[in-house]
Image (cartoon, helix red, strand yellow):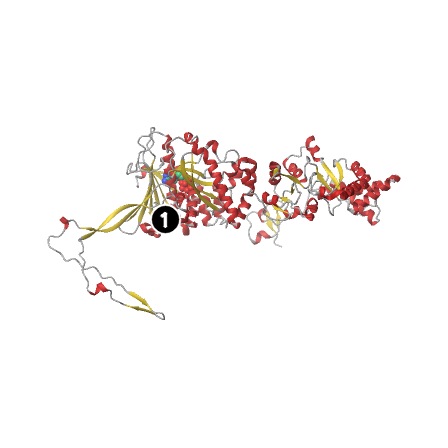
Amino acid sequence: QDADDAQKTKFEYQSDVTRLRKIVINSLYSHRDVWLRELISNSNDALEKFRLTSLTKKGFGNDDPLNITIRAVEDEDGKGGKIIITDTGIGMNKEELAANLGTLAKSGTTEFLNRAESADTTVGTGNLIGAFGVGFYSSFLVADRVYVASRPPRSKENPEPEQWVFSSTADESSFEVYPDPRGATLGQGTEITLVMKPDALDYLSTTKLTGLIDKHSAFSSTFPVYLFTQRTEEVPVEEDELPTETESVPEPEKEDRTIESYDDDEVLIEDVPIEEEKKPQVPEVPKTKTVTIDEWVHANSQPPIWTRDPKDVTEEEYLDFYRATFKDYRKPIGWHQFAGDAAGTSFKGIIFLPEKIPDSHWQQTGPLEQKDIRLMVKHVFITSEFGSDRLPKWASWVQVIIDADDLPLNVSRETLQSSKFVKQMRSIILRHLLILLNKLATEDAEKWALVTKNYGMIFKFGIAEDSKNRDRLLNLVRFESTQRKDITLDQYAENKRKGQTQIFYMADAGKTAEQIKRSIFVEKLEARGYEVLLFTEPLDEVLANTLRTHKKMPFQDVAKAGLKFGDEDNEGEDSKEAQKKLGEKFKPLIEWLKEETKDVVRDVVISNRLVTSACAIVADEIGYTANLEKLMNAGHNQEKSEAVEFLKKQRLLEINPKSPLIEGMLARVEELFSEDLEAEMELKEVASILIDGALVRSGFQVHDSNEFFVRVDRVLRRSLGVSETAKAKVDIKPAPEVDPTEFEEDIVMPDFPDYVPGMFGDSAQKPMVFDKETGKGIHDEL
Ligand SMILES: Nc1ncnc2c1ncn2[C@@H]1O[C@H](COP(=O)(O)OP(=O)(O)OP(=O)(O)O)[C@@H](O)[C@H]1O
């Protein structure tokens, strides 16, 4: 494939390619088997591209069968050899040869290369291949020189495409592109010739190549891969080839057979001549000769994995298939094979749950790429685009293959999209994804923990997005409660106490469940044995608001008004009477507090939820809880619209009648009628600290924290009997007078080696003195 130098155009590799080639060649030596898989996978992509284009473009390409062939050729002197991989795919013209093989067009390349070069331990060599797919450049792991001859398919615009060659050695930073001196030897497609390195000649063996295809590349192509093999065979000699005189046929060699006989105690091996061998009979041997037969062996002849009986497929095979198909080198959490009929078409398929949702899922706005949802027809990839029947966003990361038996292959994408079968794909995939998830939930605790960690959030999104699958998704969502970890809402409902009509929850986004459990709002429910869900993620509360009820029980934020235990009616007349009495007893305090707190809360009431705390601030049914207020403040530029301010004030001050502090305040309020101004001031201060404290404990923000601490200071002084007006004895040293004169002394610079031009090592550690005249740094030798 070498041409005259005059015809060759020399190109420099893009710098990122040079870097990638170096990384591949230097660090992947121990993984160098990957080259075959990568080249087969590129050929498969090229064949797929050709087939898809030819579906809609008339007169595109010839009718050659679509396949990949691999041939190893030893040099005549036996000292070297080549491997030639050819496909009949989309091919490349001369510009594409230079652009596709000489540049990298992948996003994140530079960042990836930086990490790989800095020997970042998170980029292990295995990951390196996986995270990036080193593709074509892996050929330089085994080849000193690579030629890529390529010819695009015929088309109306270009009925006789030319065949061009890309050629490069492993070490040079440049490559050449030139017309193939052999002319157009390819009907269409690409032929890659690897001139093997002296230490890679073992790949020339067909046994080795067959092994590699079986182990790493069997799933890299859905098109047939043929391997050129030669075998010898004994064939009968034709009549006319027989020698005229009878020749003696050599006697076949006797088999050296032994029969082993075993004793109980010792193993005894003795030669026992076999009966027939005692009197050998020379069989009549037909007259044969040895011939070499050339054969193209179908090397990936296994039927696709999704059509095989799962019992016959090993885990290793599933993983190899997964890697080759979805180019994801992390182990999937699980998979599930299925079959069925829809819209008159039978189908088979397999669905995988990747280890985690790709980061890009969260970054994309608008319609999501669904490249891992692959529709095949009779084992051939057709499309990943389903138009308006695409999966909902929550599930669009799923990796699935559906192979239909009898959809027309040659229809345009638009016609396909409107076919009845494709319209049903969405629900088929979602159904099987949910089956897979439920299987993991019930059968494998360890895997399920991983699912909850990596997917819990997306299920919650799904509940809001996909009303059709709401209940099924709800079964997958797990919560922590005051009593248990990882429970479903159904399990919560089953554990409700007699009379309980609400699902109790406490939300505090960003806190741990343990911290939320200590909230004053939870204390009484916890003490009484009611289960409270602990919402740690912002989405949890959104979810409760979306659902509103579950099993007919409304969600009740325990930090809001409206909390009912459900057994109040059973408390009997005595208790109601006691409640009424309490109301009367605390009336003076409640009235006084109402006046004092009218800027902070809407009302003051006697609490039925507090145990040890003196008081709490509780959001009204329509008001913001502390959690929502926090979210509002985080999401907005503190826009103080009147509505927001109004909602913020929709809360109640609940006082605990059993608290000695509250009892004490009541006594003071009752004494106030004597119009003792000083006593009233004192009481106001106590009340205000109590309310600010309640705001903080209830998770709200204190209006003015400075004022709060000034009050605390005064109350503390009072309790210690210290003067309330005495100032702290501070002796503040004033700064010296203004001095506008310039510095005259040498400036000693701080110990920053960077500041010292040309100074490194020891000398840079010493302080530097700057020469006043030259401005340069000089060393203080003293
Ligand atoms: N056999 C081929 N036929 C046609 N084009 C090819 C062939 N091999 C490579 N190419 C072109 O060269 C490009 C670069 O190939 P390379 O293997 O480096 O990366 P990739 O295939 O895009 O990505 P990756 O291998 O990581 O999945 C391909 O995108 C494709 O356009």
The number of discs equals 1
| Residue situated in front as seen by the camera: 379 or 126 | 379
- Residue 338, by quadrant, is top left
Q: Residue furthest left?
A: 245
Q: Residue furthest right?
A: 674
Q: Is residue 46 visible?
A: yes
Identify the residue at image location x=80%, y=45%. 663
| Residue situated in front as seen by the camera: 239 or 51 | 239
User: In the rendering, at what x and y percent does residue 588 appear?
Assistant: 82, 39
- Residue density around tag 1, few if under 14, some if 14–19, many if 20 or more, within 10 Å: some
Q: Is residue 8 visible?
A: no
Where is 402 relative to 758, above or below?
above
User: In the rendering, at what x and y percent does residue 336 appear?
Assistant: 46, 44
In the image: residue 388, left or right of residue 772: left
Q: Locate ligand 1 by image quadrant.
A: top left
In the image: residue 509, left or right of residue 187: right
Quarter of the image where the N terminus is located: top left
Q: Please, what secondary structure does the residue beneath circle 1 have?
A: helix
| Residue situated in front as seen by the camera: 723 or 512 | 512
Quarter of the image where the C terminus is located: bottom right
Judging by the rendered image, the residue that carries numbered circle 1 is: 214
Identify the residue at image location x=71%, y=32%. 646
The type of residue carrying mark 1 is Asp
User: In the rendering, at what x and y percent does residue 43 appear?
Assistant: 37, 41
Does the beta carbon of the residue at mark 1 sit less than 8 Å from ligand 1?
no
User: In the rendering, at what x and y percent does residue 75 appear?
Assistant: 28, 49
- Residue 414, by quadrant, is top left
Q: Residue furthest bottom?
A: 265
Where is 282 relative to 460, above or below?
below
